[in-house]
Each structure stands twice: as structure tokens, then as C-alpha cells.
Image (spheres, rainbow, N blue to C red):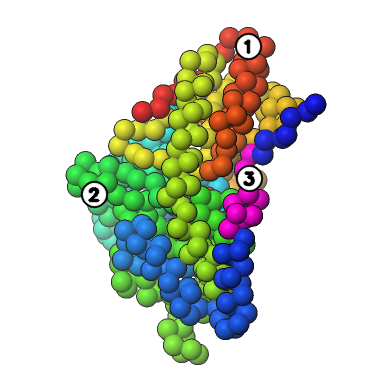
Amino acid sequence: MTPEPIPFLDLITPHRELEAELLRVVQQAFRTAGFIGGPVLEDFERAFAEFCSTRYCVGVSSGTDALRFAIMAAGIGTGDAIITVPNTFIATTEAITQAGALPEFVDIDERTYNIDLNKLREYLEFRSSWDTKTGRLISRRTGRRLAGIIPVHLYGQMADMDPILALAERFNLVVIEDACQAHGAQYLSKRQNRWFTAGSMGRAAAFSFYPGKNLGACGEAGAVTTNDEELARTLRMLRDHGQAKKYYHEIEGYNGRLDAIQAGILRIKLQYLAPWNESRRKCAQRYQEMLGAAEGIGLPYVRSSAKAVHHLYVVRVQNRDDLQRHLAAAGIGTGIHYPIPLHLQSAYRTLNYEKGDFPVTERTAAEILSLPMFPGLTPAQQRRVVEQVLEFLSLTPAQSASKGQSA
Ligand SMILES: *Cc1c(COP(=O)(O)O)cnc(C)c1O
């Protein structure tokens, strides 16, 4: 008898469990014809801002739009450059280029997979310079004005924000958080001596509610959070054809609104986000207990100053493709986030980066594998995943993949 397959992500069960509640949202929209904007949207925006401890939340149609609008609202555009990492989903850099700017990559920390602070500092100190005439910070590589940093809170752990914010102040850069994988993640700021929630530390932050994210819509959705009133006002115009009042277009904007049915669905699901994140944390702990002693596998590392929400559970092994095949043969779903670093993608040939430019990103991209991770994942399912991983490791010769630790 073949056992039930274990999916990489189970999106069926939560929707079955919440079906009656979610259907009422759709029914309400039909009965009021309130499809765009209105109280349902505003209610979700208020609740999500509260969840993130920010003053404002502006719902938009995707995480990509959230990033793009945040960049534009911060006044970054044509001729500018924004620093980010090459190991993110392409939406991060699409938003940068589609706002008229160019990405400048900085390599990542081998343990957290987030931006490496020493490399960021080194980049700012040695590979940029102040233009004496304009007083602007210029990228030596491209001659463009360096206007911002987008730290990506990858896999659900916040980037090391204290030093990022300190460097941003010193070099006059806008910080926009890519929080698309980090709904509810937290960071202990030593500078300010308190915990912060993802989305509340930068000038603005972008969230995606793509179905597979920790908080997912039943379709496309996203949001920007910010404490800046003027920025929030600009964001509301950008998502709605540049109008603050119907048919009075202060600027040219976009059709990038969050619709009321998705907002209503997100409002319901938001009530479950904290327990869902807690369940993910328990799953991560169980993987750590079951795999902690194994040789030849690197496990996720969470800094003591961070509370991760484990959007993905990413391990490292040397024969990654073989392990993925081994697990697939046992009916276990996995993913790779992400197999080709952005600086090596065909789409970005014109950025003139080369293989070898970001060695940590390139090395990890070949070794990372995302194991099943979702709120309802059971201990029995995890035991089966771990059994198969251990069987694979015992079949392959001794390996030297670096081993992370969990705090
Ligand atoms: C999902 C994601 C995005 C894009 O979100 P969409 O809603 O799919 O547009 C951007 N950045 C990161 C890191 C993501 O994981």
C-alpha cells in the first residue's frame, strides 16, 4: 500500500475549514455590489495595519504592485538605483526596473540567506561615492544615483534591520522592506530596545497575499504598510489611476487596487494568521529536533534577535537534485527558492553581472531545498519526510554542506 502523498503546501484544507465564513464574504459582495473599495477594504486595511503596528495600510492588487508603488511613492525612479539581493523572487527587481530604477546586488549571509551586512557596508563605503557637485551618492558601477535599499525578509525571517537602517541614515537611502514572505515576523532592535513586526521598520513595506503566502487571498492581492501619511496618500492615488477624487487625476497612476472580495477574505483569514504562524513555528521546531543530529544537511538558522514565521523551511545538501528526486519518488513535494540567482537570469543580461559575482548566493542556490511546510503539517507527515531525508543521506557518501543551527 502506497502512503498518501505529502504536499509541499496544502491550500485545500484551510479553505475547506473556512468555506462557510469565506462564502459569506462573496455573498455580501453580491448583495451589496460592493466589489471595489468601500468599507470591506477599509476594514481589512485597518486590521492589517494594526497587525503590523503601522499607522497605514494601503491594499493593492499584488505584492509586485506593492513594491513598485512603494518605490515610486518614495520618489525613486528614472536614473536611480536600488540595492537588493540576487536570491529573491524576480518580483523584487521587476518592481525596481518598472519604476525606472536599476537593481544593484549585494550578496547574502550564508546562514540566514538575507543581505550580508558586511558586504552592504563594504559596497557603500568602497563601491559608491559622493558626487561633489550634487551631493548625491553614486554607484561606481553604473554611475546612477543610489536611492534606496530593499532588504528581503526571505523565508519568513527579517533581515538584520538595525545595521541596515543605520547605514541607510548614513548614506541617505530609503529603506523599503520586501515583507512578502514575512507576515508577522519579528525583529528585536537593540538600537530601540524593543521588538518590531515586519513591515514597520522601513519607510514602507510590501506584502503579497498570493495564495501560498502565510496570509493568502483566494486570488491576487497585496498591500503596502507605512507610518508616513503623505506616502500613504500617494500610494492610494498610484493604485487608482492617480486620482484622490473621481476623475481628478493629480498624477498618472495605475489600475492596482485590491478588490473587496479579496479584502473580505483576507480579513477573515487574518484572524487565523497568528495561530497559523505558531503552527509553522512548531513544525520548524519538530524538523529541527528530528534532523538536528544528522550529518550532511544544513538546517535553517534563526538569529536570537528574530522570530521567524517560516514561510519556507529550507535545508541545504550537496546533492540537492538527487534528494528532490528521492523525496518525489516517496510522494513528498518540495520546492527550490530559488534555483537561478537573478544576476544570472537571461532577463538581466543587460545588468552586466557575471557568474562568480555573488558566490554565496550561487553556492546556496545549488544546495537549497524547501521541505513541506504549512500550518496543518502533522508530526506523522514530518516523520515520513525526515525518514526519507535520512535514508537519502545514509545512501550518499559523507558530505560537507554547511550546517546551520536554530536558536
Ligand atoms: C511573492 C513575492 C513577491 C511578489 O508577490 P506577488 O503577490 O506574487 O506579486 C515579491 N517578493 C517576494 C520575496 C515574494 O516572495
Disc 3 residue type? Asp
Query: Which residue matches tag 3?
Result: 10
Q: Position of residue 134 (x, y in %)?
A: 28, 61
Q: CA distance from mark 1 to mark 3?
A: 29 Å
| Residue at x 47% of width, y 25% of height | 288
Badge 1 density bin: few <14, some 14–19, many ≥20, Cα 10 Å: few
Q: Position of residue 404 (x, y in %)?
A: 44, 24
Inspect the magenta stretch and tell me whether residue 14 lies in it.
yes
**Left or right of residue 268, residue 226 in this image:** left
| Residue at x 38% of width, y 43% of height | 158
Q: Quadrant of the C terminus?
A: top left
Residue 15 sits above or below residue 345 on the image: below
- In the image, 250 versus 378, the foreground residue is 378
Q: Which callout, 3 or 2, points to the residue nearer the camera?
A: 3
Mark 1 or mark 2, which has the lower sequence index? 2
Q: Which mark is residue 170?
A: 2
Q: Which callout, 1 or 3, points to the residue nearer the camera?
A: 3
Residue 287 sits above or below residue 232 on the image: above
Whether tag 1 and tag 3 are in contact, CB under 8 A, the answer is no
**Left or right of residue 222, residue 346 in this image:** right
Residue at disc 1, secondary structure:
helix
Residue at disc 3, secondary structure:
loop
Badge 2 density bin: few <14, some 14–19, many ≥20, Cα 10 Å: few
**Please, which residue is most extreme toward the top here?**
397
Query: Which residue matches tag 1?
Result: 394
**Left or right of residue 205, residue 102 in this image:** right
Mark 1 or mark 3, which has the lower sequence index? 3
CB of residue at label 3: within 8 Å of ligand 1? no
